[in-house]
Image: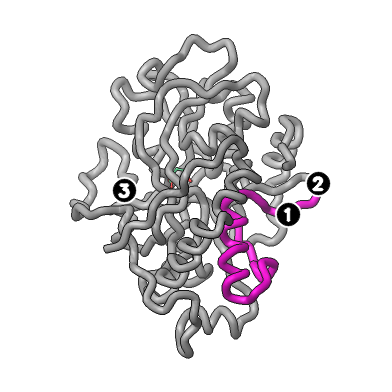
């Protein structure tokens, strides 16, 4: 597995590499905040109905592709269009030597392409900033988003999610010599996270609150940390593990202080595609494909994949 060394991370961030992309990541966030991301001090966000964010639509026609379905449209087009980011090492990041975007999330997309076409390479990747994940699903730019994306009730107002394919949680990355042990030790101190992420929302609720340093992707947060613009980065432990793998002067500390169940985001206008993706996930859990992808990117002993829940 390719690791992005520090110098390459800095070069990638500086060059803003965007080959194969439709939307260029920006140095600073420009997108409107998500429904769940109203900063404290602004008008209260609309009340979000309670729900079970882990419950998705049950597969009804298995891996069949009925005429007129969204799967048939994808098949006729010849490519599955995946929205993801390019700054999350281990999940979706650009290999600096091949320029291909790869990782756990990309492999999930490849399995869905394989189910539809019998060929995992029939995947077109669009790089989208995290803050635009739901916009691009809603406007049909992409068929799905697989991008370390937490399913929650606020986001379910706008998009559907598959069943959960990974259970993450938010932690903190600091310098190797830092005395910081948990997020509460960083009150008033500069902590980086990404626009449009649940991580940023969660940081708003920490008491005492850190000073937020906001970037468009996690590669930019790592660079901010390395340049001393941020004392820490706080986001999902999965993403922090990818950063720690790139930076020998960083360590991940403290307990998980949130639950971040990952789902695949799909437009509400074609629920049959969500059901189909759930059928693919069922097969991946059962036949060892999920464990193989886990092993490839995250190593160690693969845990049981999250069990499917349906509503
Ligand atoms: N999983 C969280 C989210 O979906 C944080 C990581 C990310 O930005 O992808 O917002």
Q: Are marks 2 and 1 in contact (CB under 8 Å)?
A: no
Q: Quadrant of residue 90?
A: top right
The percent coordinates of residue 157 (x first, y second) are: 29, 61
| Mark 1 C-beta to ligand 1 under 8 Å | no
Q: How many marks?
A: 3
Judging depth in this view, the residue of 14 and 12 nearest the camera is 12
Residue at mark 1 to residue at mark 3: CA–CA distance: 32 Å
SS for dot 1:
loop
The percent coordinates of residue 75 (x first, y second) are: 59, 81
Give the labeled residue for mark 3: 36
In reply to whether residue 174 is colored magenta, the answer given is no
The residue depicted at 46 percent of the width and 59 percent of the height is: 264
Quadrant of the snapshot with the N terminus: top right
Residue at mark 2 to residue at mark 1: CA–CA distance: 8 Å
What stretch of residues is rendered in magenta?
A: 98-127
Q: Of the numbered discs in the image, which one, if any, rests on residue 100?
A: 1
User: Image height check: is 274 above or below 218?
Assistant: below
Give the labeled residue for mark 2: 97
| Mark 3 C-beta to ligand 1 under 8 Å | no
The percent coordinates of residue 180 (x first, y second) are: 46, 14
Residue 84 seen by the camera: no
Judging depth in this view, the residue of 209 and 103 nearest the camera is 103
The residue depicted at 37 percent of the width and 63 percent of the height is: 159
Residue at mark 2 to residue at mark 3: CA–CA distance: 37 Å
Mark 3: few/some/many CA within 10 Å (<14, 14-19, 20+): some
Q: Quadrant of residue 249?
A: top right
User: Image height check: is 299 above or below 157?
Assistant: above
- Label 2 vs label 3, nearer the camera: 2
Q: Are marks 2 and 3 in contact (CB under 8 Å)?
A: no
Precedes in sequence: disc 2 or disc 3: 3
The percent coordinates of residue 223 (x first, y second) are: 63, 31
Mark 1: few/some/many CA within 10 Å (<14, 14-19, 20+): some
């Amino acid at each position: 597995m390719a690791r992005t060394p520090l110098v390459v991370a800095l070069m990638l961030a500086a060059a803003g590499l965007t080959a194969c992309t439709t939307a260029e990541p920006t140095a600073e966030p420009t997108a409107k905040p998500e429904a769940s991301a109203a900063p404290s001090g602004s008008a209260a966000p609309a009340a979000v109905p309670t729900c079970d964010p882990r419950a998705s639509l049950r597969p009804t026609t298995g891996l069949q592709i009925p005429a007129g379905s969204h799967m048939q449209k994808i098949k006729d087009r010849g490519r599955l269009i995946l929205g993801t980011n390019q700054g999350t090492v281990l999940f979706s990041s650009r290999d600096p030597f091949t320029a291909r975007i790869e990782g756990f999330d990309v492999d999930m997309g490849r399995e869905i392409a394989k189910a539809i076409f019998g060929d995992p390479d029939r995947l077109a990747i669009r790089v989208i900033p995290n803050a635009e994940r739901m916009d691009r699903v809603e406007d049909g730019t992409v068929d799905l988003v697989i991008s370390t994306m937490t399913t929650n009730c606020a986001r379910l107002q706008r998009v559907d999610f598959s069943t959960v394919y990974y259970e993450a949680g938010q932690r903190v990355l600091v310098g190797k010599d830092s005395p910081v042990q948990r997020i509460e030790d960083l009150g008033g101190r500069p902590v980086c996270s990404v626009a449009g992420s649940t991580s940023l929302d969660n940081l708003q609720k920490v008491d005492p609150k850190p000073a937020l340093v906001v970037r468009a992707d996690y590669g930019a947060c790592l660079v901010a940390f390395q340049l001393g613009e941020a004392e820490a980065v706080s986001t999902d432990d999965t993403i922090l593990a990818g950063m720690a793998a790139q930076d020998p002067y960083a360590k991940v500390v403290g307990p998980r202080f949130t639950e971040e169940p990952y789902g695949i985001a799909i437009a509400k206008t074609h629920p049959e595609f969500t059901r189909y993706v759930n059928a693919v996930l069922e097969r991946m859990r059962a036949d060892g494909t999920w464990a193989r992808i886990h092993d490839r990117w995250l190593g160690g002993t693969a845990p049981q994949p999250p069990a499917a829940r349906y509503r």
